[in-house]
Image (cartoon, helix red, strand yellow):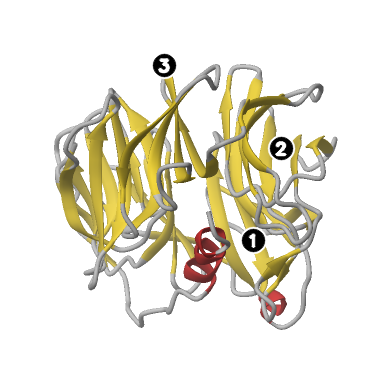
């Protein structure tokens, strides 16, 4: 895989243009599984859900939420000094990984921030994180892929990539894997952290799919042929968006022991956004006017189009009966799976 793949992720994320708009509520639905709009004029860039609400960050850096059934939109916080990269929620807080806006002009590390779910001022939990590209959470800890310090002018990543974790209050920071070449994603499962090395770091072209225990310990190489920019896990398979022997831009199914790699679908239009749910791998393709949300059976087959008006790659979540997504027209909608 060329450097185009990973740096394309960074460029698309960091250069998203804001759209001027206002928000207002829509009438909430009466049933538990609502299909239809739940908020309008909501140009979302990152999205997460819990049992009661949908949370999103918009083009202006506002953190907002609305009931999963629709209703009044609440403004919770403003991240006006940051370029936000990833977001997760737990029972009490919203956690966001971000780069300071100054990172456009000079290389500098990023941060992990938190905001109470009821709203407030973003607080820095962890500082000095070299481009915290992806953030995940379990019952006690935050985990992140630090891709390496980004030099935006040069389009390079410094050789300081790592996989880290810390307690949710920001203490107990721990490096789980150091000297990692531009990791862009982490996935949690049981006692393990799954991650990929993309080979995009200057001076370190190591690639492959790896695991490390959540508590730290021995790094295990699963497969060193595939280049995983994104990872999704199902009970039987590890899915990767990236490159392999057969294609420079594709979706792959990797055996959990790394013994085999199958290409599911390939094409320059694929941009990631992986979710593995109920035997399907959902993913996003970039089209001329908007993104499209599609799925393919975990065993392979013909891709199925869900919608062709997704606003942004990280702009959807899947619950028990519907997909929650932001559209290019500025609606936050629930659509049938």
Disc number placed over residue 236 in the picture, else none: 3
Q: Nearer the viewer, residue 70 or 199?
A: 199
Residue 325 in view here: yes
Q: CA distance from mark 2 to mark 1?
A: 16 Å
Q: Residue furthest front?
A: 245
Label 3: element kind: loop
Determine the residue positioned at 76% across, 79% down: 106
Mark positioned earlier in the residue sequence (3 or 2): 2
Residue placed under numbered mark 2 in the picture: 168
Disc 3 vs disc 2: Cβ atoms closer than 8 Å? no
Label 2: element kind: loop
Q: Nearer the viewer, residue 40 or 313?
A: 313
Q: Horizontal and vertical percent for residue 140?
A: 68, 27
Q: Horizontal and vertical percent for residue 226?
A: 53, 38
Q: CA distance from mark 3 to mark 2?
A: 30 Å
Mark positioned earlier in the residue sequence (2 or 1): 1
For the residues carrying marks 2 and 1, which lies nearer the camera in this image?
1
Determine the residue positioned at 81% across, 45% down: 179
Residue placed under numbered mark 1 in the picture: 98
């Amino acid at each position: 895989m060329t450097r185009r793949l990973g740096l394309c992720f960074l460029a698309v994320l960091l250069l998203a243009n804001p759209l001027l708009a206002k928000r207002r509520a829509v009438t909430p639905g009466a049933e538990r599984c609502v299909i239809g709009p739940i908020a309008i004029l909501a140009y979302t860039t990152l999205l997460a859900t819990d049992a009661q609400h949908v949370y999103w960050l918009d083009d202006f850096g506002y953190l907002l939420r609305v009931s999963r059934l629709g209703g009044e939109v609440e403004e919770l916080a403003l991240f006006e000094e940051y370029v936000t990269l990833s977001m997760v929620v737990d029972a009490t807080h919203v956690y966001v990984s971000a780069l300071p806006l100054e990172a456009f002009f000079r290389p500098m590390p990023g941060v992990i921030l938190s905001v109470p779910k009821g709203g407030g001022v973003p607080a820095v939990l962890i500082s000095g994180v070299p481009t915290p590209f992806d953030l995940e959470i379990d019952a006690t800890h935050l985990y992140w892929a630090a891709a390496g310090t980004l030099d935006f002018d040069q389009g390079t990543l410094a050789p300081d990539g790592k996989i880290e974790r810390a307690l949710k209050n920001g203490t107990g920071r721990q490096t789980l894997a150091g000297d990692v070449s531009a990791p862009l994603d982490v996935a949690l499962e049981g006692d393990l952290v799954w991650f990929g090395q993309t080979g995009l770091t200057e001076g370190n072209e190591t690639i492959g799919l790896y695991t490390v225990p959540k508590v730290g310990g021995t790094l295990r190489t699963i497969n060193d042929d595939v280049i995983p920019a994104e990872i999704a896990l199902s009970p039987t398979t590890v899915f990767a968006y990236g490159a392999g022997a057969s294609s420079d831009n594709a979706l792959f199914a990797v055996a959990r022991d790394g013994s085999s790699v199958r290409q599911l679908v390939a094409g320059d239009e694929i941009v990631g956004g992986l979710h593995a749910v109920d035997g399907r791998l959902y993913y996003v393709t970039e089209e001329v006017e908007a993104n499209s949300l599609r799925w393919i059976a975990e065993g392979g087959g013909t891709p199925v189009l869900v919608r062709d008006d997704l606003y942004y790659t990280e702009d959807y979540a899947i619950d028990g009966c519907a997909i929650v997504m932001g559209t290019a027209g500025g609606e936050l909608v629930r659509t049938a799976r």
